[in-house]
């Protein structure tokens, strides 16, 4: 076979030991919070039937699905005429499966398929990769992990309060202390559309407002008038929302004023108040939670709360988001299943921790101690200690080949090994070992049991 | 959109909370052993370029690769003539990527792409799903996890000894105590081919011997003569290997006798002796390790040790296997990289633990305590305790809706929750809570701090 220079598909990545250690630290931290709040783990298959995926993510989403060629003679249903009709026409005849695009649709499918045996409210978390045939660019990949937690089968606003608590706790555990959790409610946005005389146009309003951070108030207004058919009067009436400030109570009071005539708007505000009442009763700090009436997240399927998290001292977009949806499973035939959920962006959190230098040393630990191998006598003398360390739960390895001191020390350094054990004639004759701390360079002459006791 | 009855692709599975808890227990147990022996985690992309995958698994393997349709206009390189030439001819024009078929080839690719920065010997473990378009049947899936550990860049037989130690430790940790680790060496099989006068035919010999467990000695001999061109004399000379028994020393001695004239055969036996010498020096018990001269594993790329694990008291094939290969990365242009590795079969171990009822209760723990919700007063009274429990690290949830006692108790039972907290008027008036042990039914009246202390 010809030798080839291998590569990975564009937009995909290998995660080597250091990256895996960091990613595992992030995921373990988040998962442990999910579990503490009663969420249970779910995994769904990488491939889903295209009938499950198609039509759930809009036309653009359908384009971005990775499709899998049918097994066996995938052309058996294809005629020359199909080929003439083109790629889009022919695709369903050669492909019935696609790669998971997100974790929400597979979750909905799972709930519907297992509705008879699941206990509701069902709290599930799911941490798996998803695939999108997006144009790869800096920070955007074709394979990336999502990290979702959702509750379905209840409309209790306690769930929203718990999500605020979980977001705060996970970020605190990750030492991302300078963050803001933004909270809004879709009903408030609906109310605003009513209050400015543009009933039913909250979707258009959301899409425009969603760009506020990027393009500013002027351009948002311009877009509303020129592209989305809003009146000048409506845009004028909208303007107060961009200058709302003060405490949560102040903001809610101001909005109550603006939405006085909108029943749905007032309902949204009272839901917000109830969420904050729950956090207060639970004793969850909300000093980092901000009611942001301009938070829209452009997603038309949210029907209640909308969440988003920003890190204030890092150069990064939102690292988490979510909201309440009233009909997650309707598309698969199960109506009235209200749910609320959110997701952490693992790749973005990875970069934030990198930028702010927040990875703890313990997360980066590899093998704790390496036993050197200078000759057969030293090696054989060290082998019982090697296994003693492991039996005591200490991660240990012996350099498998006889090699020079420098080579072995370089190896230990590069692998991030904290301690090295040396056994020359001198140590052997005393029935001891030299234990070298690779960070301080300090070296101690110790017995096997002393070393095990020290490293355990 | 029309309502649809959703399903998963054949040969794939959802893993719900209980299955995930069991699988996580298995994988965490295995990973923790891997880490203790100095192995580091690697993850590679789900999709690989077909140029990396094709030709590595034989013709049958190439057929079983799941191929991904190119993004965008995947037909742009296809003509009517291509269609006429058929599926196999057209495939490379519409698909450049496939799903990972195993973890070995991606590992080899990774090593070659990162040879400049990796420190050798490189010990990596990798736990990820793989995909094969096999005909689904009982116990065989199209998506399943592999769980590999390999060392590359050394030919030290210490690695073989460590693999025996790791296999034994992982199985002991999983409480699979009645197991046999079979060990052989490819060079011994080569030596046997020489000794019976069928030089160079050890591959054919391996393929036939590999079926010994399934078809018996008679059929193996028949196959060797009728299908693989072995002489009657060769088969006669082979017969002693089927009756070898006794201690490892006895077996090696018997084989030394048989292979007295085969240099490579004797080399294989001395490698085996060296491996056992290492385990003895390390203090690793080998009472469950058996030198089995008929172990072949049909894989032509093994060049030294061959491993396989069977559970003696369960109805299951091998649950682990591996071996040494001398040229893992040669196909990608990096020669002389010797390695040795093995893998645990997660699905099979799952079934064994199920059959032998070996899952520990702790692995199945979900939420530790549920707080009930009978009315707003009781709920509000319980909310501070809820968060106090979580802050103490106790997994806790409050039933989010007001509901009847029976419904909430059923929910807790079904979710496997160990304790339930009740707060009626009576408890509230005393500033206490009733804590019910769901297993024993026992109920205690306790303060919030007492409950936290008890469950922590």
Image (spheres, coloured by chain):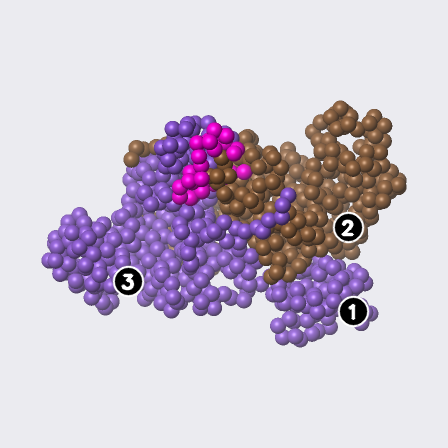
Chain colours: A brown, B purple
Q: Is residue A23 left or right of residue B148?
A: right
In the image, residue B300 lies at what x, y percent? 27, 48
According to the picture, the residue beneath numbered tag 2 turns out to be A275
Disc assigned to residue B213: 3
Of label 3 and label 1, which has the lower sequence position? 3
Residues at discs 1 and 2 in contact (Cβ within 8 Å): no
Respond whether the residues carrying marks 3 and 2 are from the same subunit.
Answer: no
Q: Is residue A277 visible?
A: yes
| Residue position marked by numbered label 1 in the rendering | B424
Residue at left 82%, top 42%?
Answer: A265
Return the residue nearer the eye: B438 or B450.
B438
Residue at 57% x, 46% y: name it. Answer: A52
Q: Is residue A445 visible?
A: no
B148 up-or-down from B252: above or below = above
Q: Secondary structure at mark 3?
A: helix
Q: SS class of the residue under badge 2?
A: helix
Looking at the image, residue B437 sits to the left or right of residue B307; the answer is right
Question: In screen coordinates, is B234 left or right of A26?
Answer: left
Q: Which region of the structure is painted magenta?
A: A65-89
Q: CA distance from mark 3 to mark 1?
A: 65 Å
Q: Residues within 10 Å of mark 1 (few under 14, many from 20)?
A: some
**Chain under callout 3:** B
Q: Position of residue B161 (x, y in %)?
A: 32, 56
Image position, residue B132 (x, y; %): 41, 47
């Amino acid at each position: 076979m010809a030798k080839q220079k291998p590569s990975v598909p564009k937009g995909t990545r290998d995660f080597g030991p250091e990256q895996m250690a960091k990613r595992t630290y992030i995921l373990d931290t988040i998962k442990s919070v999910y579990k503490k709040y009663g969420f249970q783990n779910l995994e769904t298959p990488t491939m889903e039937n295209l009938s499950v995926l198609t039509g759930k993510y809009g036309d653009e989403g359908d384009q971005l699905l990775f499709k899998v060629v049918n097994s066996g003679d995938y052309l058996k249903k294809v005629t020359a005429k199909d080929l003439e009709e083109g790629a889009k026409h022919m695709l369903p005849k050669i492909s019935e499966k696609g790669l998971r695009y997100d974790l929400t649709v597979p979750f909905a499918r799972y709930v519907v398929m297992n509705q008879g045996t699941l206990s509701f409210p069902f709290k599930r978390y799911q941490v798996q990769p998803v695939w999108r045939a997006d144009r790869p660019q800096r920070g955007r990949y074709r394979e990336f992990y999502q990290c979702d937690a959702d509750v379905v089968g209840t409309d209790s606003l306690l769930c929203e309060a718990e999500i605020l608590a979980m977001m705060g706790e996970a970020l605190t555990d990750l030492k991302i202390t300078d963050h803001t959790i933004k909270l809004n409610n879709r009903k408030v946005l609906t109310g605003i559309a009513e209050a400015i005389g543009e009933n039913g146009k909250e979707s258009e309003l959301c899409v425009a407002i969603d760009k506020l951070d990027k393009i500013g108030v002027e351009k948002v207004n311009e877009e509303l008038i020129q592209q989305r058919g809003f009146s000048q009067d409506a845009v004028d009436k909208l303007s107060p929302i961009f200058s709302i400030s003060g405490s949560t109570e102040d903001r809610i009071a101001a909005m109550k004023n603006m939405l006085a005539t909108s029943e749905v708007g007032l309902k949204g505000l009272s839901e917000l108040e109830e969420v904050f009442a729950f956090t207060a009763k639970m004793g969850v700090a909300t000093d980092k939670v901000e009611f942001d009436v301009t938070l829209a997240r452009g997603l038309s399927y949210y029907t209640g709360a909308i969440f988003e998290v920003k890190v204030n001292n890092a150069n990064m977009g939102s690292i988490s988001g979510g909201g309440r949806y009233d009909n997650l499973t309707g598309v698969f035939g199960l109506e009235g299943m209200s749910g609320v959920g959110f997701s952490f962006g693992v790749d973005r959190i990875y970069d934030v921790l990198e930028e702010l230098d927040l990875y703890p040393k313990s997360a980066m630990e590899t093998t704790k101690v390496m036993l050197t191998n200078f000759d057969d006598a030293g090696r054989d003398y060290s082998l019982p200690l090697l296994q003693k360390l492991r039996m005591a739960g200490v991660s240990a390895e012996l350099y498998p080949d006889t090699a020079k001191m420098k080579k072995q020390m370089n190896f230990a350094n590069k692998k991030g090994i904290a301690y090295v054990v040396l056994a020359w004639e001198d140590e052997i004759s005393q029935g001891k070992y030299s234990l070298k701390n690779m960070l301080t360079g300090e070296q101690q002459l110790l017995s096997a049991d002393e070393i095990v006791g020290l490293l355990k």
